[in-house]
Image (spheres, coloured by chain):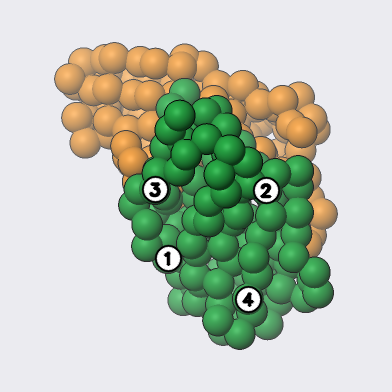
Chain colours: A orange, B green
Amino acid sequence: EADIYQTPRYLVIGTGKKITLECSQTMGHDKMYWYQQDPGMELHLIHYSYGVNSTEKGDLSSESTVSRIRTEHFPLTLESARPSHTSQYLCASSESSGGLQETQYFGPGTRLLVL
Amino acid sequence: AQKITQTQPGMFVQEKEAVTLDCTYDTSDQSYGLFWYKQPSSGEMIFLIYQGSYDEQNATEGRYSLNFQKARKSANLVISASQLGDSAMYFCAMRDTGGGNKLTFGTGTQLKVEL
């Protein structure tokens, strides 16, 4: 089971502020993901990375950006937060097994509220 | 396009009883993997069980088992001997090669275990 950490757990911030959501994992997993989830709804993939210096956009369009400078670290940044960004953001990682059984392990999530 | 359908928005079960959470999927691939995750109110996603499309036996993990009916494209989660701590949101997810090996999640089922 992966050890994956997200900070902050909760964030309340005003419109127009720049924010960075942190995600770190200690298992050396190559692949990392960011999902967005509205309350009681399904998860939508917004960004993923298959290794250092590799980032791709997911299925759901997002104004956020990500970077992957180190294997263990995959931060997500919003340059100018808006109320429409209010949601829960979940980070996940997986080992590159190359197979369909590859399991994603999730962090505790960050609940963002933009006023 | 791959799709996951969970038709039960909410389910109630009495403690110590068994409960089945429904999941149907749609894919044109022959090779795919099915996952179930649990999401307590605290927000993290906890991996429960995996079933591969070529697995001949239904997957089991402790009190969790997967009732896999390939011809019907269903992958229902069975929780035996329900406990109060099982109260959570449960998500079915699928990965197939047509989806770029990414996970697609259903809308989830909210399970409430009662005394």
> Rounded to the nearest whole Å, what is the CA distance between mark 2 and mark 1?
20 Å
The percent position of residue B6, horizontal first and vertical second, equals 42, 61
Labels 1 and 4 in the same subunit: yes
Q: At numbered mark 1, what does the secondary structure look like: helix, strand or loop?
A: strand
> Rounded to the nearest whole Å, what is the CA distance between mark 3 and mark 4?
21 Å
The percent position of residue B66, horizontal first and vertical second, equals 66, 60
Task: Please tell me how crowded label 4 is: few (under 14), some (14-19), or many (20+) other residues with Cα within 10 Å.
Answer: few
Judging from the image, mark 4 belongs to the subunit labelled B
Q: Quadrant of residue B81?
A: top right
Give the label on residue A4, or none. Answer: none
Q: Nearer the viewer, mark 3 or mark 4?
A: 3
What residue is drawn where x is 76% and y is 47%?
A: B61
> Rounded to the nearest whole Å, what is the CA distance between mark 1 and mark 4?
15 Å
Residue A60 visible in the displayed image: no
Residue corresponding to mark 4:
B69
Image quadrant in which the C terminus of chain A is located: top left
Task: Please tell me how crowded label 3 is: few (under 14), some (14-19), or many (20+) other residues with Cα within 10 Å.
Answer: some
Q: What type is the residue that disc 2 sits on?
A: Tyr
Residue B41 visible in the displayed image: yes
> Rounded to the nearest whole Å, what is the CA distance between mark 2 and mark 4?
16 Å
What residue is drawn where x is 27% and y is 22%?
A: A113
Residue corresponding to mark 1:
B5
Residue corresponding to mark 3:
B11
What residue is drawn where x is 69% and y is 55%?
A: B65
Q: What type is the residue that disc 3 sits on?
A: Met
Residue corresponding to mark 2:
B64
Q: Are marks 2 and 1 in contact (CB under 8 Å)?
A: no
Left or right side of B79 for B5: left
Q: Tag 4 or tag 2, which sits nearer the N-term?
A: 2
Judging from the image, mark 3 belongs to the subunit labelled B
The percent position of residue B112, horizontal first and vertical second, equals 42, 37
Q: Tag 1 or tag 3, which sits nearer the N-term?
A: 1
